[in-house]
Every structure is written in structure tokens, then in C-alpha cells.
Image (cartoon, rainbow, N blue to C red):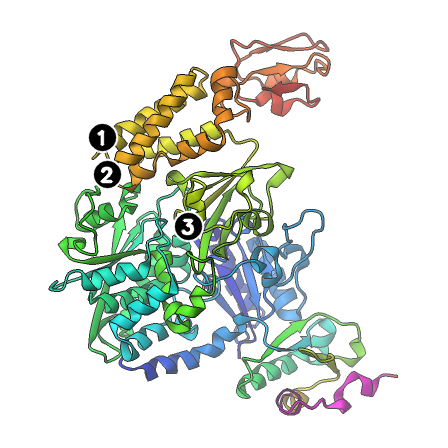
Amino acid sequence: MKSLAELSAIREKMKEKVVLREGTGETRVVVGMATCGIAAGARPVLNAFVEGVSKAGLTDKVTVTQTGCIGVCQYEPVVEIFEAGKEKVTYVKMTADKAAEVIERHLKGGHVISEYTITNYQL
Amino acid sequence: MIRAQVLVCGGTGCTSSGSKAIQQAFEEQIEKNGLVDEIKLVQTGCFGLCALGPVVIVYPDGTFYSKVTPEDVSEIVSEHLLKGRVVDRLVYKDTGDLNTIIENVSLSDTAFYKAQKRVVLRNCGVINPENIDEYIAMDGYQALGKVLTEMTPEEVIKVVSDSGLRGRGGAGFPTGRKWDMARNLVKDADQKFVACNADEGDPGAFMDRSVLEGDPHAVIEAMAIAGYAIGATKGFIYVRAEYPIAVKRLEIAIGQAREYGLLGKDIFGSGFDFDLELRLGAGAFVCGEETALMTSIEGNRGEPRPRPPYPAVKGLFGKPTVLNNVETYANIPQIILKGAEWFASMGTEKSKGTKVFALGGKINNTGLVEVPMGTTLRQIVEEIGGGIPNGKKFKAAQTGGPSGGCIPAKHLDVPIDYDNLAAINSIMGSGGLIVMDEDNCMVDIAKFFLEFTVDESCGKCTPCRLGTRKMYEILDKITKGQGTLEDIDTLEELANYVKANSLCGLGQTAPNPVLSTLLYFRDEYIAHVVDKKCPAGVCKDLLSFTIDPEKCKGCTKCARNCPVGAISGAVKQPHVIDQSKCIKCGACMANCSFGAISKQ
């Protein structure tokens, strides 16, 4: 190790790998991964979020995790986004492409994409 | 892309309860379910809740699984990792409040962790200790970089002094002052040394082991910083050979640090050279005493020598030496990075920062806890420790092992720091904290620790060699019901004499268990001597088992279980114990279905 820059390079490279363990970012993206969710294609959605969040450099702020069935199986894959001090947003019938859009517009831009939310489908 | 990580504890506690097999099972199951690219398996150091081992944590949600078996693994993988359904039956249930059992899914929400402040243990159970990159990701070696490129040795010593850090080995000597002395007292030394005391000898103490197993690089980094501060280029870590996992991880860590050039020549291009060597101790308690430890590193029989001269003047191989404990070092990198004010903001007026305690004895959550100085014993025992099992009553807590004292219930609310513990006749010690309930006999406890120090006395000085032996003999006599009131006075006198006249810390502190139990539990000594009774029902020679003829149904179960045939009686008639034959093993009492047998 001849310089601090070298050390910082290793640190940056590794940071992403351990940041998961620091636990809760301010925002939590929860993907429904029960049998119904997986059958409807939740796994590519989950992976799209994990990769997209990382690519967007949001790993410090956003935690991507999974949960079981939330009970609206006909709308799976369901993704819920929890942000501190805000109402939870529930996106339904998600795809990997929609996930990329949510990362761009919602997580980065701060705008809820209402046409993908459950309120747009229900009732 | 990794979306979740499974952390399996690889500390000594969990390894002995089978975490290796669990790790293998995870490898197989993750592979089988095609999750290799999504789930990362990490072996870490101790999480702290050793009683519940083997423990497994799943991030990012922080789900805390306890007492996991290899058979459980396929369920965790297929349910939790694949489908996102937490396996409830394996999730740690909070034992903090026995009346309302709350299911905790996240580790940080449990009563055990919530009241803790993890500074020294920040990486334990979080990073893989065998991977230097993970330590670097957690800001590792940044402090060393900062010190070597931005600070003068004097500035380093000033930061450590200002932080108020005191020696965590037990004596509480200000670390900054120690470094200052080693830097400045001897001006013309051609060589100086940095040494680390990892000879954790107190029965029941295991915080140093856990730090070495869980975060070995923190100690290595701190020793290099100490080397720069005092002008030493060489360091020794003296670690017990009985800590094989700690030794192995230290060897790996030193190897990786050398490979990265974080040990060796010209570190960070600053011109500063520093390297480390391990020295394995053979397990003599006295080798935890600083002068004996250094004598042992030099290759001689581990015996203490008089001080002064202090190690800062004449230490290892006669050269100025800084010797600190593992936990002390583990604080250093963060003090450098976050500043003296940050560290000094935690704790009490004279004791800054946090302290790690190894909780053991009669307590629900056996394990490792780190709390800010000034936390009360009550908080540690009742909140974090989850109280005493089986609804028993707290009697005393023993701190400092064989060198420490007992803290009775009336001092439960004393904020724990070096000075407060000394004021109530105990010591901080290295951090062993053994909780005792009403079933513990305090005379017996004192005898237990004295037996230990008699064995471990190196024999060099007479007060310790003979004094501890004589004290043990008196205690033995008392527990056998042959003691007199005069014996108690002699014991006290002898204890004070040994304390005042012994050569090293071992002898000077060996009488503490006797003195503190005499101070707080003299009535128990008197009960043994005058009434010939052991109030806690521990000392066998003072016990007698009797059968209540009213309750005895004559089922003959006790007679059949008595190993010496001391119980007689006809079927369906009350039985009787022949006291001259009884060996007080308690088998009859344990087997009686009617509660007819009592001991007193």
C-alpha cells in the first residue's frame, strides 16, 4: 500500500458488498416473493431493483428486500416502497422494465408513478 | 448481483455448537436452489448472543435466527431466501421480558442489542474477519493512513489523551499518558516495541477473544498507529494458545496486511516501517500481568518483576515498550477517525467510551455485550441480559474474575465505571461479569476463586505463594463447618496483608473476592461458622437431607435412586435417611415426585 488513494479504491469497490449489512436505508423497497409472486415473475423484478439501485448509486439510501404474500395475488408481482415520513406506495403487476422506471422516477426523482400503483387498478 | 447475505457466526461459541456444518449446508442449499449469484454466504466473528448459538443473520432485513441446526438450513433457503417468508419458528424470541414474549424479526430491535453501543464490537458479526477487503470497506486502515500522512506522533498521542481512553485490561491507566511516556521518557532508545496483551486469563471472560476472532485488523491497525506514535517499528501480540480460532485469524490478517503493504516497509509511502509477530502463551494466568507477559515473550519463564522501572522505560528486551490490551487497541482507529470529542462524549466524567462485558453465570442471555460507561448493573442484568432464569433472585455480580469483587444487590444502580467500581470494593477488570442468584454460596465463590489463584500463583513472592494457600485453607475449613469466628478475623487480616505485600497484580488482587464477600456477605460466613449452616445450600458438609414423613407416600423411588443405600423404609411407609451414610448427592430430592425431601 503506497498511497491513501489505493486504500480508498479498495474501500469504494468493497463498500457495496457490505452496505447491505448496515441494514436500513431511509427507503425500503420490498418485493413480494411468495409462490404467487414468483409465479408471476417477481424474481426478475427483485433482481432488477437490486441491480438498478446499485447502478444508480442509491445503495446507501435504499434497501431492497423481499417479503411473503401480502394477499393481492392477482396483482403480483407486487412491490411496496416505504419511505421515512411518507405513505407507503404499492406498485402492482411489476416487470423488470417498470422497475427500472420506478428507480429512475420514484427513487431518484421522488415522483410516484401513479399509473403503476394499486389505486389505479382497484375498485 | 448479490441481493441478500447470509452471515453465519464463526466465533468460538458457535463453532463449538456446530456452525461449521451449518455453513456447509448453506453452501449446498444455495447451490441447489440456483441462488449462487444472488445470495452471499459470509462467515463472521461473534455476534454476542452465544447462549443462542449457532446464530445466522440474513441481511438486508437483519432477520436473526438462533439455535439453527443443519436440518433447518434447507427450510431457511427455500422459504426465506427464495420466497421471502421468514421462518418464524427459528427467529430469536426476545427473552427480555418473560411476561410478554415479543417476536423480533430484526436483530437490532431486540432488547439484547437495543441498549448496547457497539464501538469495539462494531465489526464483530458484521464483516468476514478473514477478508481484509471487508475491513477496509468499513473504513479499515483509514485511521492508519490519516495518522501517517497527516499527523505528527505528538498529535496522535494528544488525540488519544484527549479522548480519555483508559486501559481496558482492567487497571484503567490512561492510554494517552502511557504512549506519551513511552515516546518521551527515554530519548536515546535505539529500538522500541509495541505489544498487545491478548492473554485473556480470567475465568468467564472472552471479549478479547471475540474481538480477535471477529475484527483482527482493528487490533493490527491500532498497533501500527501506536508504533508510529511512540517510534517503534516492531510489535508483538501475546495470545493464548488455547484460542486457536483467534490465532488462525490473526495469522491470516497479518498475512493479508503484509500483502497489502499495511505492515512492512514504507507504509503509505510515509517512510514508516512496522511489522508484527505473534507469540503464543501456554495459558499461565500470571502471564496476563504485564511484566510476566514480557518476560514470557523474551523466551523466559513467565514470572513478574518489580516495577519501576515501568515498561515505558524498560520493557521488552530492556527497551521502552507500550503494552495495551486488545479491547484498548480496538478503540484506537475509531478515535483517530471520529475524533477525541466523539469518544469523550460517551461515558462518565472519568471513564470515557464503552466497555465490553462477557455476561455469564445465572443469566438468560449469556454472551457478549458492549455498553457505554456509566450504564448501571441493573440495566445490564435485567434489560440486556434478560434477567435471571427460573424466577430466582439476584444475589450478586462478580466483576474482574479472580482479581475482582462481588457487587451485591444494593449496588445494582451504581453507574459502572472504573472509579465507581473501585469505590464499592470491586474492579472493572477485563470485563468478565458473572451473575449469581440465591443458590450461590458466597463463601464457596470466594473459595473457588482462591483455588484458582493458588494454582496460578507463580510462586516467586512469598505473600502470594503462601498467603493465598493459607487463605484457601481457612475458606475450606469454613465451608466444612470447622471454622471459628477467629478464623474469619485471621482470613481478613491475611487478605489485607497479601494485598499490600505481593509483588505483582496477581497477588495484589487475589484477596479481592474474599475481602468483598466479607464486606457484603459476612453474615453468610458467620452462618457457616456459628450455625454450621450454608444458607444457599451449596456446601455439602453443612447440608442435611430429610424426608417429611407427612408428605412421603412410601413409593421407594428415593431408596432405589440412592447410590449409597442410605434410605430405608417399607413400601407405603414413610422413608428415613441415614445421615451417617448420606453423601449429599441430592439424587433422592431430584427423584421425589411428592416434594417430600428437603435440604437445609
Are discs 3 and 1 less than 8 Å apart at CB? no
Using the numbered discs, state the Cα–Cα distance from disc 3 to disc 2 in whole angstroms. 23 Å
Q: Residue at x 29, y 28 (%)?
A: B467
Q: Secondary structure at mark 3?
A: helix
In magenta segment, residue B345: no
Q: Chain of mark 3?
A: B
How far across and down, in percent of the image, does residue B457 sit? 28, 35
How far is disc 2 from disc 1 in space, using C-alphas?
9 Å
- Label 1 Cα neighbours within 10 Å, binned few <14 / some 14-19 / many ≥20: some
- For the residues beneath circles 3 and 1, the answer to whether they share a chain is yes
Identity, as a three-letter code, of the amino acid under mark 3: Tyr
Labels 3 and 2: the sequence-earlier one: 3
**The magenta stretch spans residue A119:** yes
Q: Which residues are magenta?
A: A103-122
The picture places residue A79, in percent across and down from the top left corner, at 70, 80
Q: In the displayed structure, does residue B100 sit left or right of residue B301? A: right
List x then y, in percent, for residue A94.
Answer: 71, 85
Q: Which residue is mark 3?
A: B418
Upstream in the sequence, badge 3 or badge 1? Answer: 3
Q: Is residue B165 above or below residue B387?
A: below
Name the amino acid type tagged 2. Answer: Leu
Majority secondary structure of magenta residues:
helix
> Any mark on residue B462, and which?
1
Q: Earlier in the sequence, mark 2 or mark 1?
A: 1
* Residue B256 visible (yes or no): no
Q: Badge 1 sits on which subunit? A: B
Residue tagged 2: B503
Q: In the image shown, does A115 or B302 lie closer to the viewer? A: B302
Instruction: Give a yes or no on whether discs 3 and 2 share a subunit.
Output: yes
Q: Is residue B553 visible?
A: yes
Image marks 3 and 2: residues in contact by CB distance under 8 Å = no
Q: Secondary structure at mark 2?
A: loop
